[in-house]
Image (cartoon, rainbow, N blue to C red):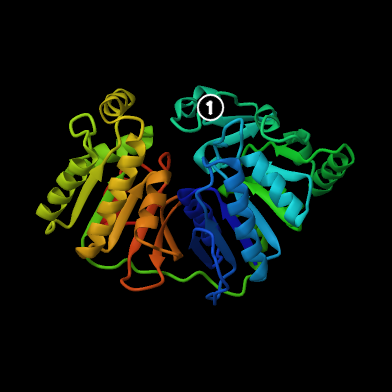
Amino acid sequence: MLGCLADDFTGATDVAAGLRRVGLQVLLLIGTPIKKMALPDCDAIVVALKSRTIPAAEAIEQSLRAQRWLADHGVTRFYFKYCSTFDSTDAGNIGLVTDALLDAVGGAPAIICPASPEHGRTVYQGHLFVGSQLLSESSMAHHPLTPMTDPDLVRVLARQTPHPVAALPLQQLRSGPDAVRAALQQATEAGVRHLITDIADDTDLAALAAAVADRPLLTGGAGLARALGAHLRSTAARAATEDHLPAGPALVLAGSCSTATLEQVARAREVMPAHQLDPALTPDPHQLLTRAQDWLHKHRSEPAVLIYASAPADARAAGQAAMGPDTATVLETTLATLANNAREAGRRRIIVAGGETSGAVVKALSLRSLLVGPEADPGVPWCHTTTEPHLALLLKSGNFGRPDLLVRAVEGATP
């Protein structure tokens, strides 16, 4: 069985979607499990943590606790999933968590593979690209929590770990599995603990997965995990089941301010009632929530509604100037409370845009496990609760999805 540790909630749904797409039955657990539990038949377990931006010591503790729980439930092969844009800071947490997991399960040097070609994330000569742009020239350079201003992953990771970091060139990867294994042996002999892998397309991911599938620990984005799942699927005993979306009204909550989400929100506003959480106009948190709750109640008979805090940079700056440094937390908490209100009012489909917002919503709903269903877009699967009432959630990373995703989601459509 494969056990995945994801450093945020939408990252967890992304990797779960990739594993399900290649035919594995996937269980998604919310937060670090705390006790032994009976598991449904599955080929992979994905544990959704919220460790990307917390202090490194806490991230390490959460990750090791989850790893031990998975090991106690029979997992021997582990995957540490982080964002395909390598979101992190110089203080961690990717390098430090990887070091801790290597100490726990072995397998050095660790494969470091954030590439996800289907989402335009590739690595060449150790540099991360978003589409045709270097990472440092993309919108990620201005991320409010983890600005990525250096595209050289060897350099980035070297600032997060005391251990040596090196790169596996594309030419060597494409020379075949034996060449990859030789590179790993050379890295081991040289004391290298982290090996950044060049990836240009999905064929490269498949080649890498075939060469390293037997290692106890791999790390990367959803791309390598999906390739690994495809490599392992011949031993899977079960086929992924189809899941039906529950009937009833839907709620869309958007907290991400990415370019993709802003366009998706604009499309959604054209077809459904929408309410904006604007801290510049309503800086008092209690009043902000109360007005949104009143609006949601007023529109209780609508088949789908949108509540959003997504805004361009200038509006975000105005909101923070009015509400103060806790603006982002207030907005996340407000959206999460509204999700709980909506569930109590009978809404059974909840669509959430944004990783931090998704984590807050899942926590507010007190969800502990989800079964992963079909994708609405690549990396954006429907997830179904395992307890009543039956809820279907679409937890979307800010940058993911086509412009009409939110509109299709409230209709229950898939590609």
Quadrant in which the N terminus is drawn: bottom right
Residue 323: name its quadrant: top left
- The local crowd at label 1, few if under 14, some if 14 to 19, many if 20 or more residues have their Cα within 10 Å, is few
Q: Is residue 148 left or right of residue 182?
A: left
Whether residue 244 is situated above or below residue 339 in the rendered picture: below
Tell me residue 237's x, y (percent). Answer: 61, 75
Tell me residue 93's x, y (percent). Answer: 60, 40
Whether residue 317 is situated above or below residue 247 in the rendered picture: above
Q: Please name whichever residue, 224 or 62, is drawn nearer the observer in this view of the structure.
A: 62
Q: Residue at x 22, y 47 (%)?
A: 306
Can residue 415 be seen here? The reply is no
In the picture of the structure, the residue carrying the numbered disc 1 is 132
Can residue 311 be seen here? The reply is yes
Q: Is residue 348 left or right of residue 65?
A: left
Whether residue 237 is situated above or below residue 103 in the rendered picture: below
Residue 394: name its quadrant: bottom left
Which residue is situated farthest in the left direction here?
A: 298
